[in-house]
Image: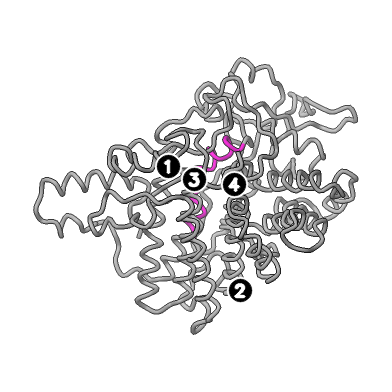
Amino acid sequence: MTYYKNKHWLFVVALFTLLTSCHDFEEINTDPTRMTNIDVASLLTQVVYDAGTRSRSYGDIGNYVGQYWTNTSLIDQRHRYDFKGSDSEEIYDNIYGTLYDIDDLKQRARQEKLDDYLAAGLVLEAYLTTYLTDVFGPVPYSEALQGDQLNFRPAFDTQEAIYRANLDSLELAYSLLETKPQGNFTRGGDPFYLGDHTKWRKLSNSLKLRMYMKMVKVDPSVISDIAALINTDELIATADETAAIIYDGRFGLESTINTNTPGSVALGETFATKLQAILDPRRPHMAVLGVDKDDNPVNVDQTGNPVYLGVPTGESPDIIRTFEGLAAPYSGLNGVTAPSVLFSQAEAAFYIAEAILQGYVAGDAAVHYQEGIRASCAWWGVAEADIDAFLTQEDMQLSTDTQQALRQVWTQEYINFYYQGYDGWLNYRRVGFPEFHVGSAMLTDEIMQRMVYPPLLKSVNTANYHQAVELLDEGDNLLSNGWWSNQ
């Protein structure tokens, strides 16, 4: 079922070598491990699962670059932007491996005239390829999945071109779902929404809203699109509409996520400070409090509240070792059903609040701001009474000053993206808030703007790689800006 999984580029190199020395092209180009005649429902389950796990298995890297985590060991220094070539390979290969399975799903859905499965494939493809170009910049897109046609050197597409194409794909997916073919996902296999077309349409629209909110500064014409989407009332708006893989045993989806605390990892100071400033009730659900041998909090504030202490990102081990009683993050939601979130109810609510404050659409920003906080807290398992008390705090009321109100919304967006580390970093690149820490031991003197391309890509697709690098303002460098980046 899985095709070009994880070692996608290694397989490409091996295949290319064979093609230059053998003559039986048809035999060589047949993948003996690739299953045939896969049921479309099984394909859907597989690609949904992969979109939530394998293609996001680099979440620990995201938590470092999003300054949610800092590593306290001498071994893992990715919080200093000290990456290995395999870090880029992992992101790149996992996403392209999943895209091949999505392509299988789309082909099978077209053959069997199953519009809903085709639409699901289009939505997941747009989600993943948008992620890919946001992380790297120009990447293969229009020619990316042509291995069966012996095209192992695909051209790179610009980030803007990929965005425009994905918006069209999401629009097509919405229309395919709107037609409501016979039944709703009649073959089954939908771990997201159990075949509910309305929820899939809302996911499609919500992904478009996320893209428009990134694009708006480079293309103000999308303001009208933002307003139109918000006014449709067809965005993710409830917890059961959140797009997430829940590892509860259904569909055979057993968790691959460790729900303990990762070794030698502490909360990043940027994140911990934001939580501490408002005594956020999500803290005990996100991290383990630093305690002494008698289980008493090591750090408390002036009023006796325990402090979930974080450590600055990008500093040397000598500086990190001066901190005591650091809070250790859970490796996910603290529980056996720890989910992988692709798009949450809270994210949509915060975008609406932000759009109102920016003047893109009319409405009450405070209502959506508090709705987002309530949804995020509930998702993390905070009791309803504690959420109510939290929202009544004076410092949780949305300011009447627009700029201060925006900073409040952006803070909550950042907190909500915890354990979606890359999303938090991408949102920082979009709005420039909260202020990230530039550590004295970082390999750059600014916050990174992208991942560099995988080493193997440079040797396999050299000419197109160099053309892509020319499109980057700083070359194949961590500091090259993306198309829409605010930095």
In the image shown, does 412 or 400 lie closer to the viewer?
A: 400
- Would you call the spot at circle 1 few (<14 residues within 10 Å), some (14-19), or many (20 or more)? some
Q: Which mark is residue 471?
A: 1
Where residue 154 appears, x then y in whole percent? Answer: 31, 51
- For badge 1, the amino acid type reads Leu
Chain part drawn in magenta: 48-66
Among the two numbered marks 2 and 4 on one chain, the one whose residue lies closer to the N terminus: 2
In three-dimensional space, the C-alpha distance between marks 2 and 1, rounded to whole angstroms, equals: 39 Å
Disc number at residue 423? Answer: 4
Q: Residue 102, position in %: x, y?
A: 41, 62
CA separation, marks 2 and 4? 25 Å
Q: Residue at x 53, y 21 (%)?
A: 74
Instruction: Tell whether 343 sits left or right of 302.
Output: left
| Coordinates of residue 41 in the picture (x, y in percent) | 44, 70
Q: Which residue is mark 3?
A: 57
Q: Nearer the viewer, mark 4 or mark 3?
A: 4
Placement of 180 over or under 483, stated as above or below? below
Query: In which image quadrant can residue 108 be found?
Result: bottom left
Q: Amino acid at mark 3?
A: Ser
Judged by depth in the image, the label closer to the viewer, 2 or 1, is 1
Q: Which sits earlier in the primary sequence, circle 4 or circle 3?
A: 3
Q: Assign a secondary structure to mark 3.
A: loop
Residue lying at 32% horizontally and 38% vertically, measured from the top left: 458
The foreground one among 264 and 376 is 376
Residue 60 in magenta stretch? yes
Circle 2/circle 4 CB separation < 8 Å: no
Q: Secondary structure at mark 1?
A: loop
The quarter of the image holding the N terminus is: bottom left
Residue 212 lies in the magenta stretch: no
Q: Earlier in the sequence, mark 2 or mark 1?
A: 2
